Image (tube, rainbow, N blue to C red):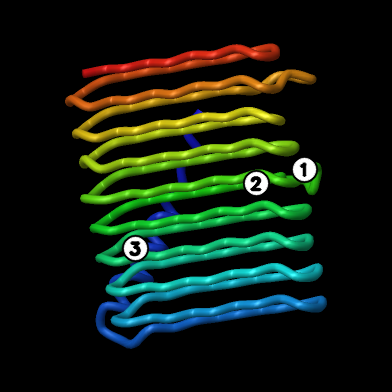
Amino acid sequence: MKMQLTSLAAAAVMLSMASLAMAGSTSNINQEGAGHFSDVDQQGASESKIDQSGGGDDARVKQIGTSYSEINQVGGGNAADVNQNGQSSYSQVNQYDVNNTADITQTGNNLWSRVNQAEGRNGHGNYAEVDQRSWENDSNITQLRSDNEAYVKQYGAYNESDILQAGGNEAYIGQYDDNNTSYVSQYTSGGDANYTKVTQSSNYNYSSVAQRGTGNETVVYQH
């Protein structure tokens, strides 16, 4: 379920970060359409890329240290806010269609976050929030169709989470210690209004939740 970067792509990103450590920050912004807004604030030696097409998209990036951020917005009214403070972290946000929102905060080192919303331009109104601290945490969120909500908190180290949603679902993952793994799949044709909350507050826990249909609720506590 986890969408890993290929080893070649991962190596390219790490090489880019190593090069930035010996240089200044770089920012590349490409806007096509009307009414887009981009704001980049970099301190240190980070790299950011923003691509916006359509109309009225909003992208904001703040980086302190040596990290990499990429935001791709295709459609209108999408909003992405990325705040990175630390070394060698990676954030990618892809937003398609309209009115999707992503809020990413990474504080620490070697943190990885990927958010894909309404890929294929078949959805709107999705919300994703990721808060990563410490080091070596990995989060992946994929939201298909419309009106999904996903919240991830990773406050320990070496944690992994993966959320897949398809239409009107809600998922919370909280990982507060080390070496935890959580997978949530809320995906079925015509199903929605599913709810999952996973809390992992000790070490080496594993949780996998798959919800099919409508109106299901799952709560997992691992202490």
Give the structural element (helix, strand or loop) at label 2. Answer: strand
Q: Is residue 9 above or below residue 182?
A: below
- Report which residue position mark 1 lands on: 123
- Is 86 placed above or below 130 here? below
Kindly indicate whether the residue at mark 1 contacts the one at mark 2 (C-beta within 8 angstroms). yes
Instruction: Place residue 74 in its image quadrant.
Output: bottom right
Cβ atoms at labels 2 and 3 below 8 Å apart: no
Question: Which residue bears the numbered disc 2?
Answer: 117
Pointer 3 residue: 14
Q: Quadrant of residue 145?
A: top right
**Residue at the image point whose x is 18% and y is 25% from the top:** 202
Q: Where does the image place residue 9, in percent across and percent down from the top left?
A: 46, 56
Q: Nearer the viewer, mark 1 or mark 3?
A: 1
* Mark closer to the chain start, 1 or 3: 3
Q: Residue at x 26, y 65 (%)?
A: 86
Label disc, if present, on residue 75 of the rendered structure = none
